[in-house]
């Protein structure tokens, strides 16, 4: 979502004459768009600000002014503390108010004093962003449809930094989707912290579910692929599962975090589901779409996690089987309930558990990828590959696929025969160029 937000920040500043530059030393305005999910997120921001302080001083020696803004969830969480600890900062702006940058920058010019804007405004920030998007840098574009979260998992900062759940109206999403497709996007990834709670206002005045929205967007001519992330197991319903079985444009890949396999740990996390619930959901999804690739997030060493609890996580991974996973050692986020628990797990125990878990996940991922050797996959080519004359794209299962081909194939979907399987990507040879998800012509 920060990639999406950063693009929108740049778009909102374009009418003021700003354009993107590659080198911060050349920038009149530097926006650090921060993520609070990362471990030691605030410390990393302060260390980046130390480097920017020197850059600002060097530019001042050349007679150039540099405005430094901190945006995103660390800005929201730290607030005024950032200005107090780092006087080099001119602007602190939360993730729900970056649309105000065009009015805040002139205020800064006039007033000179640092500005803090971390409110959760009543009005919809999306309505204040430019209606028309620039050409996406990739044929695969992001589109935020939902923000915030009401779940309050005890380890997570999102409900505090992104605020309460909010769903954009269907008409606004559709307009942005059509705009992106007109500009060359073939694939859209719908974003939300808790995307499958989506319940935006539909054109009929009712609340539309994510499933209904996906069916609606799939009708857009030229839009070949749809994805969505991140989902919560509690909000996976039959309607959404049916979409995976029935709508060809919805890719057979689902990122569905389970975080821990032990029910006592899940309860302490306030996840509102059990390990068995998750397994049943995975079975229902696989019954509807047998080839679906499941991906997940897992935390090891949550406060109070015993060896037995951890064994339940390994067991769940073994029973479900994942094509991809993101696993982390628990690390406290200031201000969250879990950070105050006194039964923290020692770091060396967390490290050992993470190693064991990741070895299992790596084996599962390797087995998943190996199953494609010699088979054909449709690949949407997004950019240049590792080697000259090579392109890289994504399979329906989100695997990076490298294949020989010229730039004329960028943005195209082609049939690729898989000839090699690496730990993180596949290699193949282009066989056919697809005109659409359903139609294929021979090259
Ligand atoms: S559902 Fe996701 S975003 Fe919401 S509190 Fe839990 S982990 Fe955070």
Image: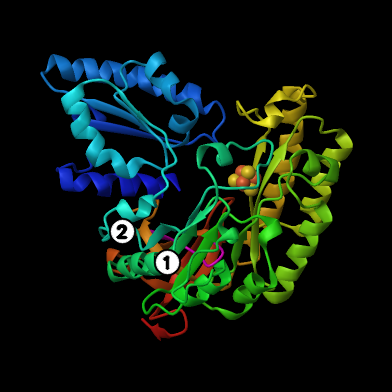
The answer to whether residue 131 is above or below residue 148 is below
The answer to whether residue 60 is above or below residue 400 is above
In magenta, the rendered stretch is: 391-398
Quarter holding residue 277:
bottom right
Q: Position of residue 29 (x, y in %)?
A: 23, 32
Is 150 on the left or on the right of 389, as rendered? Answer: right
Q: Earlier in the sequence, mark 1 or mark 2?
A: 2
Whether ligand 1 has any atom under 8 Å from the Cβ at mark 2 is answered as no
**What is the count of numbered marks?**
2
Q: Quadrant of the C terminus?
A: bottom left
Whether ligand 1 has any atom under 8 Å from the Cβ at mark 1 is answered as no
Quarter holding residue 430:
bottom left
Q: CA distance from mark 1 to mark 2?
A: 11 Å
Q: Position of residue 10 (x, y in %)?
A: 27, 45
**Residue pointed to by mark 2:** 136
Would you say residue 27 is visible in this rendering? no
The answer to whether residue 310 is above or below residue 390 is above
Q: Which mark is residue 187?
A: 1
Quarter holding residue 254:
bottom right
The residue positioned farthest toward the left in the image shown: 63
Q: Residue at x 74, y 74 (%)?
A: 287
């Amino acid at each position: 979502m920060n990639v999406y937000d950063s693009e929108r920040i740049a778009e909102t500043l374009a009418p003021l004459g700003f354009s993107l530059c590659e080198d911060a030393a050349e920038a009149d305005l530097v926006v650090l768009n921060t993520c609070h999910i990362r471990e030691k997120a605030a410390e990393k921001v302060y260390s980046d600000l130390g480097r920017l302080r020197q850059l600002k001083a060097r530019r001042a020696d050349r007679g150039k002014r540099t405005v430094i803004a901190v945006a995103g969830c660390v800005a929201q969480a730290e607030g005024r503390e950032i200005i107090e600890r780092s006087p080099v900062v001119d602007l602190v702006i939360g993730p729900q108010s970056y649309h105000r940058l065009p009015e805040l920058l002139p205020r800064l010019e006039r007033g000179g004093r640092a500005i803090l804007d971390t409110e959760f405004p009543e009005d919809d920030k999306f309505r204040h962003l430019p209606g028309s998007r620039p050409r996406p840098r990739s044929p695969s574009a992001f589109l935020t449809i939902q923000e915030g979260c009401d779940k309050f998992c005890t380890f997570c900062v999102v409900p505090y930094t992104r605020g309460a759940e909010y769903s954009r109206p269907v008409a606004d999403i559709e307009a942005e989707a059509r705009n992106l497709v007109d500009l060359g996007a073939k694939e859209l990834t719908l974003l939300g912290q808790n995307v499958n709670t989506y319940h935006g206002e539909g054109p009929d005045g009712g609340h539309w579910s994510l499933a209904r929205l996906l069916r609606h967007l799939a009708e857009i001519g030229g839009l070949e692929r749809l994805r969505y992330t991140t989902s919560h197991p509690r909000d996976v319903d039959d309607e959404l599962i049916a979409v995976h079985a029935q709508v060809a444009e919805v890719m057979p890949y689902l990122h569905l975090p389970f975080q821990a396999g032990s029910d006592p740990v899940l309860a302490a996390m306030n996840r509102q589901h059990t390990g068995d619930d998750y397994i049943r959901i995975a079975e229902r999804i696989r019954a509807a779409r047998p080839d679906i690739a499941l991906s997940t997030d897992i935390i090891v060493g949550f406060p109070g996690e015993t060896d037995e609890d951890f064994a339940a996580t390994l067991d769940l991974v073994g029973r479900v089987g994942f094509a991809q996973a993101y696993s982390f050692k628990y690390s406290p986020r200031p201000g969250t309930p879990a950070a105050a628990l006194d039964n923290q797990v020692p770091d060396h125990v967390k490290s050992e558990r993470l190693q064991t878990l990741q070895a299992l996940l790596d084996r599962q991922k390797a087995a998943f990828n190996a199953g494609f050797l010699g088979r054909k996959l449709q690949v949407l080519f997004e950019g240049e590959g590792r080697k000259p004359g090579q392109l890289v794209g994504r399979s329906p299962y989100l695997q990076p696929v490298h294949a020989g081909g010229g730039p004329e194939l960028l943005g195209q979907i082609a049939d690729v025969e898989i000839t090699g399987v690496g730990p993180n990507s596949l290699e193949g040879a282009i066989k056919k160029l697809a005109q659409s998800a359903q139609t294929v012509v021979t090259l």
